[in-house]
């Protein structure tokens, strides 16, 4: 138990913790977009920066923010600030960056398919990991859902593989579940890793995939393109 001088300080500590993560994840997401356009390996750069013993804490980019804390608490804090006549501009900008990540990932999927001479419409897109973080079954505010909605609207044939999720719905429609990653890879035009579940890291299934987009930075194979 960590004592504070009052209840407001204790509550604000949790808001501050989640807002700190929210802003730093958004920073990495923006750096991911810049680095891709500039031909820089962000993942390598982050690992190098993390060797500094002070002044840097490593955060990684992703398809957006999810869960019941980070997407909600900073927005609540921003709302409270506006109610007293102050704007938390960093927090609001971080929200903007995070909200556009599913659309950016969808564009990267389109680019990867186009490089093979395929359109998104009619292509079989497999989403690997549809929870909001790795190694859990929690789908609350998962960025996989807005991404899937974009791809569905573009005419993609969507499936998912996730050892923690028996059912995954998008806009009232249940997506086809593929239980075995090897099977998913063999039948896909592109496999998009949204979460680095341990089960995904323990198999070498991606080596035979036509196209792989890794949003997690943890899938190691020569045919993998990272965010």
Image: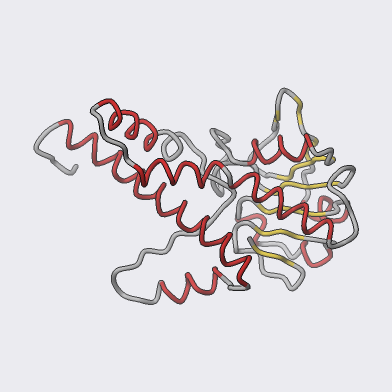
Is residue 84 positioned above or below 52 on the image?
Answer: above
Is residue 87 positioned above or below 180 on the image?
Answer: above
Residue 214 position within the rendered picture, expressed as x and y whole percent measured from the top left: 67, 59
Is residue 100 positioned above or below 197 on the image?
Answer: above
Residue 131 position within the rendered picture, expressed as x and y whole percent measured from the top left: 60, 41
Q: How is the image coloured?
A: secondary structure
Seen in the image, is 150 located left or right of residue 7?
right
Q: Quadrant of the C terminus?
A: bottom right
Residue 191 position within the rendered picture, expressed as x and y whole percent measured from the top left: 76, 54
Which image quadrant is residue 32 in? bottom right
Seen in the image, is 148 located left or right of residue 29?
right
Residue 102 position within the rendered picture, expressed as x and y whole percent measured from the top left: 63, 44
Residue at the (59%, 49%) spot, across then down: 63
Seen in the image, is 46 located left or right of residue 209?
left
Residue at the (60%, 58%) spot, across then down: 216
Looking at this rendering, what residue extends furthest in the left direction? 5
Q: Total marks drawn?
A: 0
Looking at this rendering, what residue extends furthest in the top direction? 172
Q: Quadrant of the N terminus?
A: top left
Q: Viewer-proximal residue, 114 or 218?
A: 114
Q: Viewer-proximal residue, 14 or 95?
A: 95
Q: Viewer-proximal residue, 155 or 195?
A: 155
Is residue 227 positioned above or below 183 on the image?
Answer: below
Which image quadrant is residue 167 in? top right
């Amino acid at each position: 138990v960590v004592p504070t001088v009052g209840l407001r300080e204790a509550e604000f500590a949790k808001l501050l913790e989640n807002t700190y993560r929210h802003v730093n994840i958004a920073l990495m997401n923006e750096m991911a977009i810049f680095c891709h356009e500039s031909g820089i390996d962000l993942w390598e750069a982050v690992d190098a920066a993390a060797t500094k013993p002070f002044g840097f804490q490593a955060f990684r980019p992703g398809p957006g923010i999810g869960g019941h804390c980070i997407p909600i608490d900073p927005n609540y804090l921003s709302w409270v600030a506006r109610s007293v006549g102050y704007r938390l501009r960093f927090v609001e900008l971080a929200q903007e960056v995070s909200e556009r990540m599913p659309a950016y990932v969808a564009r990267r999927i389109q680019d990867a398919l186009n490089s093979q001479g395929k359109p998104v419409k009619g292509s079989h897109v497999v989403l690997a990991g549809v929870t909001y973080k790795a190694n859990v079954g929690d789908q609350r505010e998962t960025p996989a859902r807005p991404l899937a909605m974009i791809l569905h609207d573009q005419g993609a044939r969507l499936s998912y593989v996730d050892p923690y999720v028996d059912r995954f719905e998008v806009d009232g429609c249940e997506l086809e579940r593929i239980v075995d990653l090897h099977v998913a890879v063999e039948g896909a035009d592109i496999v998009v890793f949204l979460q680095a579940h341990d089960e995904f890291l323990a198999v070498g299934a991606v080596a035979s995939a036509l196209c792989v987009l890794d949003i997690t930075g943890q899938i190691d194979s020569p045919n993998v393109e990272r965010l």
